[in-house]
Image: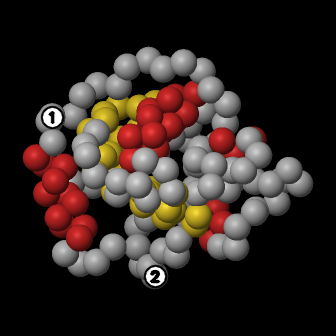
Amino acid sequence: MTRLARPAAMMALLVLAACQPAGSTPAATNASSRPGSLAQDPSGAASVPGSVASEAAGLPDGFPLPPGARELPIETGSALLGRWEVDDPGNEVYDFYVEQLPANGFTVHAVAPGDTVAIVRFTAPDGRQLQLDMTGTFTVRLELGPIHP
């Protein structure tokens, strides 16, 4: 994300309605166990070059990824745990995470949906407080990292 795009995205979040508490969601399967997921292929090996780097950076166990997500590089020194891009409408990607995070043992605390920017704040099963930023309309960029303003 360019230097101007990130502050602009964060400013868009401020314009959104106040964060709302997440409601309960139906059970779903872990994306890492589904065919087409980036997390693992049927052999259990990483299916995308660079996914080992994400795991080394501390990607939470069981973190779901939408089918077809492509891993993106992370800048040296970044606090991000992972970056991906997926060619699905933003509202579908948002709905995926609102359903899949709780189904995989993550506790969602706040959600802020928007037209081209959305966030989900949650606690991972290991206790870490994390935030997933989603930007885009038909191609969505995902950035997972610690909670930030």
Q: Is residue 56 above or below residue 130?
A: below
In the image: residue 34, left or right of residue 87:
right
Taking the spot 56% from the left edge, 41% from the top edge, the residue there is 126
Q: How is the image coloured?
A: secondary structure
Hey, which quadrant is residue 137 in on the image? bottom left
> What residue lies at 15% left-to-right and 42% top-to-bottom?
16
Q: Quadrant of the C terminus?
A: bottom left
What type is the residue that disc 2 sits on?
A: Thr
Tell me the residue that label 1 is attached to: 18
Residue 61 on image: x %, y %: 64, 46
Can residue 77 be seen from the camera position used here?
A: yes
Q: Nearer the viewer, mark 1 or mark 2?
A: 1
In the rendered image, the residue lying farthest to the bottom is 76
Q: Quadrant of the N terminus?
A: bottom left
Judge from the rendering whether residue 10 lies leftward or rightward of residue 58; answer left or right: left
The 10 Å Cα crowd at callout 2, few under 14, some 14 to 19, many 20 or more, is: few
Distance between the alpha carbons at the discs numbered 1 and 2: 33 Å
Residue at 48%, 20% in the rendered image? 25
Mark number displayed over residue 76: 2
Q: Is residue 131 left or right of residue 87?
A: left
- Does residue 61 appear in the picture of this structure? no
Q: Is residue 61 left or right of residue 100?
A: right
**141 lies above or below 36:** below
Q: Quadrant of residue 53?
A: bottom right
Please tell me in which quadrant of the rendered image residue 92 appears.
top left
Secondary structure at numbered mark 1: loop
* Residue 65 horizontal/vertical position (percent): 59, 48
Of residue 21 and residue 38, the one placed in the foreground of this image is 38
Q: Are marks 1 and 2 in contact (CB under 8 Å)?
A: no
Q: Earlier in the sequence, mark 1 or mark 2?
A: 1
Amino acid type of the residue that numbered disc 1 sits on in the rendered structure: Ala
